[in-house]
Amino acid sequence: MTIFWQIVGGTVASLGGVAATVILVVKFCGGIIAERLQKKYELKLNEDLESHICCFRQKNYISKARFEKEFAVYQ
C-alpha cells in the first residue's frame, strides 16, 4: 500500500510542477499580449485625437478669417 501512495504522491507532485510551469508561461505571454494590445489601442486613440485637433484648427482658422473680414467691413 505504501508503494501506491508513493506513486500517487509522485504523480500529483509532477502534475503540480507542470501546472505551475504552464501557469507561469501563460502569465508571461499574457503580459506581452496585453502590452501589445495596449500600444495598438493607444496608437488608434492618438490618431483619432489628431484628426479631431486638425478639424478643430481648420474650423478655428475659418472662424478667425471670417471674423477679421466682418471686422474690416464694420470699420
Image (cartoon, rainbow, N blue to C red):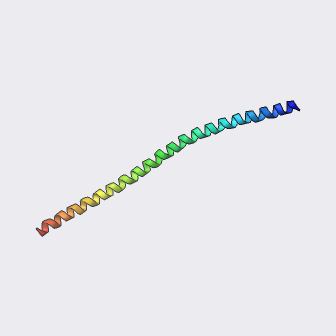
* Residue at 55%, 41% in the rendered image: 31
Name the image quarter holding the C terminus: bottom left
Classify residue 9 as left or right of residue 54: right
Farthest residue in the left direction?
A: 75
Residue 59: x percent and y percent?
Answer: 28, 61
Classify residue 20 as left or right of residue 55: right
Residue 41: x percent and y percent?
Answer: 47, 49
Residue 12: x percent and y percent?
Answer: 76, 36
Residue toward you, 60 or 26: 26
Q: Quadrant of residue 60?
A: bottom left
Residue 69: x percent and y percent?
Answer: 17, 65
Q: Quadrant of residue 16?
A: top right
Residue toward you, 68 or 20: 20
Name the image quarter holding the N terminus: top right
Farthest residue in the bottom direction?
A: 74
* Residue at 57%, 42% in the rendered image: 30
Say if 14 sits above or below 53 in the image.
Answer: above
Say if 70 sits above or below 9 in the image.
Answer: below
Q: Quadrant of residue 58?
A: bottom left
Total numbered badges shown on the rendered structure: 0
* Residue at 36%, 54% in the rendered image: 51
